[in-house]
Amino acid sequence: MKFIILILFSITFSFVSSSQTVRNIVFYNVDNLFDTIDGVNDDAEFLPAGKNEWNSAKYFEKLKHINQVLDEMKNPLMIGMCEIENETVVRDVLKHSTTMQKYGVVHYESMDARGIDVALAYDSSTLKLAQSGILRFVLPEQTAPSSRDILWAKFSMKKDTIIGMVNHWPSRRAGQDESEANRLQAANTARHFIDSLLKINCNYKIVFMGDLNDYPIDKAPQLIQEKLTPMICATSGKFGGSYNYKEEWDILDHIFVSQGMTKKKGIKIVPESGVIHSFDYLLTEYKGIIVPFRTYGGAKYLGGYSDHLPVSIEVSVP
């Protein structure tokens, strides 16, 4: 009897495995991916004659580094990126990849003074873009949009629908407390959009990702967590975070998913699959502390990858 049960279990397991494919959804703050061309935005520091002496050699090295990271993700379904200058740099990343040349890109120019935007690349052989847009908001005490937009894209896959959202919330440069109202504005904008989606269909499949410039315990991310499930936590990575500030690690790079991603049919989340990736080449030692290997340290060119570590989740695709 035990032998028969073992055979039946093996057949069932094989059927489930063969009928579904596990794919990654990735978010990566690529740390100032600028081209070398003078644009309408304030990109002077990232020009050949600028203080960073940004040139083609450094640019192509940066593309190579990003592709090295993405290749580790093994043909991701979606890739959210932030700190990109324009759509061209994202397409250059994909063009120089051996596996992602046919990916589609969703991008909109934001009102950020430096031209820093977000983008979403996707496997166009699996996902069909149905709609996309941005959520644009005005920061407190300002009269016009001046921050990065929140990008959203709605995809169809067979009979399924999935909505991706990419964020890069306002920075902490003025101080955490002083700048918190800015991130709360971004969070409320995103939350209103999420609420409107779930009001239409409570089973909508939403993947919300981004550099929120806030930790999980902060007020702004908590507004999102009231509606979506966080997939990145301290135990998701070796160091307990995706970013190191003053010798302490914590999570600035987040991925949340809606309850619809747990349903049995269609694309669904692999439980507890959130990962903060810390490949050896992404790290370096500074004053005896392990930190992300960044492209620049101040104005000094280090030739590294990013000041953030990439994060990902796994989804099961029928």
Image (cartoon, rainbow, N blue to C red):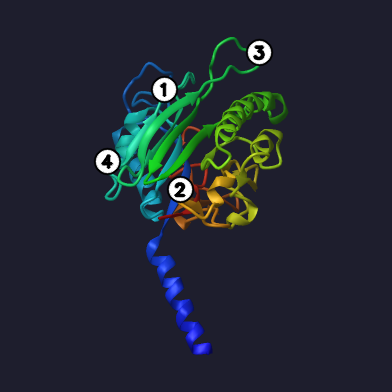
Q: Which residue is mark 2?
A: 25
Q: Residues within 10 Å of mark 2 (few under 14, many from 20)?
A: many
Q: CA distance from mark 2 to mark 1?
A: 23 Å
Please report whichever mark, 3 or 4, sits nearer to the chain's N-terminal start: 4
| Residue 226 on image: x %, y % | 68, 39
The answer to whether the residue labelled 2 contacts the one labelled 4, judged by CB atoms less than 8 Å apart, is no
Q: Residues within 10 Å of mark 3 (few under 14, many from 20)?
A: few
Q: CA distance from mark 2 to mark 4?
A: 19 Å
Tell me the kind of residue under disc 3.
Glu
Q: Residues within 10 Å of mark 4 (few under 14, many from 20)?
A: some
The structure residue drawn at horizontal position 68% and vertical position 24%, both measured from the top left corner, is 181
Disc number at residue 69?
none
The answer to whether the residue labelled 2 contacts the one labelled 1, judged by CB atoms less than 8 Å apart, is no
Q: CA distance from mark 3 to mark 1?
A: 23 Å
Q: Nearer the viewer, residue 207 or 33?
A: 207
Tell me the kind of residue under disc 1.
Glu
Q: Nearer the viewer, residue 120 or 304?
A: 120
Tell me the kind of residue under disc 2.
Ile
Instruction: Determine whether 199 is above or below 292 in the image.
Output: above
Q: Which residue is mark 4?
A: 95
One can see residue 297 in this view = no
Q: Which residue is mark 1?
A: 109
Please report whichever mark, 3 or 1, sits nearer to the chain's N-terminal start: 1
Callout 2: SS? strand
Callout 1: SS? loop
Q: Which residue is mark 3?
A: 141
Report the quarter where the C terminus lies.
Answer: bottom left
